[in-house]
Image (tube, rainbow, N blue to C red):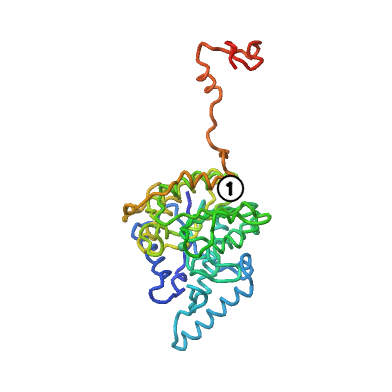
Amino acid sequence: MTTALVYDPIFLEHITPRRHPERPERLQRAMAVLEALGWLQREGLVLLSPREASEDELALAHDRFYIRSVRAAAERAAREAAAGGRVSHFFAPETFISARSYEAAAKAAGAGLTAIDALFKGEIDNAYCLVRPPGHHAEYDEALGFCLFNNVAIAARYAIERYGLERVMIIDFDVHHGNGTQNIFYRDPRVLYFSTHQAPFYPGTGRSDERGEGEGLGTTINVPLPATTGFETYEPVFRQVMAPAADRFQPQLILVSAGFDAHWKDPLANMYLSTAGFAQLIMIIIKLAKDLCDGRLIMVQEGGYDLQANAACVATSINLLLGDDAAVDSLGPPPEKPFRINTDVLIAELRRIHKLTGYRMRNAPRPDIAKLRREVKGPETEISSSDPANSNGKGTDGSP
Ligand SMILES: [Zn+2]
């Protein structure tokens, strides 16, 4: 297995104000953990430097006027910093820009493109893009929620335009709903967007009845989950809603919006996943990619604001992509929960909304009909189809 880690130190030069949760230390800590594990030199792992996405490539998911406004804001920030002024400037709600933010954001978007090129050249099997700023809140013409360019959306469109793919799936398990990704593909049937997220919560979108529109109707799947949801609900949602939806869609590439803010230690959210829980969920995704699209899988960093939890989840993801099955976990299981949600009811409702009730996965093991018949009949009641007593559908004793 060859896994790419796509990373560039430029990502640390996107500067946010003091005490802002989306800070350079998030990636620094993840890289430090990989270094401490000796995994940056690990067999099978290749380090790739992302290229900068061009304006044309950013325009696969964004308005050109908006792209230029991000660049202009970074240039203004550079001039102000050079004159001894502030380093980080408000740009949009929760979103800030510093002198090198455009370069960082264009390389964060470029990371997915670098990974896709390497994947389709056959140089790698899968990839982890360790990037910031994150992307899934970024809209077509608007920054939001720490995000400037929608990295995963640009990657999906690039795979479609450059490599002629017809179906790409985006799995977004960041604890926040990816409003930007949803909106960019809301009418696009070529991209299946699947999101699990805490609700009600920021940014307020992602109701289960938001299912896409026009030709894209049915290719948006939202799973809003109440605070305190843990693995015991995430796992059946992944196996019984996400997996059959993926199987029905038959993606040629799976992209993951990998946010680790549903970790129980995360300071921004209230979910109860552990690193080991994330590992199990990621293994479901890896298996799906193997079954459906020759293992083609690219994970792209989104949120995750507890430095230790995020770093552990990044290292775990890379370990799993390399083919191992162990989590890197020093934080352990979540605390006891005040209550449990009725997962069966939730799953049944989601399957009903998305017309998956009764759906059987194509590669699910088929029942052995001949064996079942033998078991039903037993050894003494051999029934011949030419027996006239059976031709009217009645048994030999005349009962219906
Ligand atoms: Zn998030």
Above or below residue 323? Residue 36 is: below
| Residue 255: quarter of image | bottom right
Label 1 environment density (alpha carbons within 10 Å; few <14, some 14–19, many ≥20)? some
Residue 382 percent location from the top left of the image: 56, 12
Residue at x 63% of width, y 65% of height: 60
Residue at the front extreme? 399
Mark 1 CB near ligand 1 (8 Å cut): no
Residue at x 45% of width, y 52% of height: 44
Above or below residue 391? Residue 62 is: below
Residue 6 percent location from the top left of the image: 48, 61
Above or below residue 351? Residue 93 is: below
The disc labelled 1 sits on which kind of residue?
His
Residue 225 percent location from the top left of the image: 46, 54
Under tag 1, what secondary structure?
Answer: loop
| Residue 51: quarter of image | bottom right
Residue at x 34% of width, y 57% of height: 37
Residue 17 percent location from the top left of the image: 42, 77
Q: How many marks?
A: 1
Q: Which residue is mark 1?
A: 354
| Residue 315: quarter of image | bottom left
Is residue 289 visible to us here?
A: no
Task: Say which quadrant the C terminus sits in.
Answer: top right
- Is 338 in front, or is 357? 338
- Is 273 in front, or is 45? 273
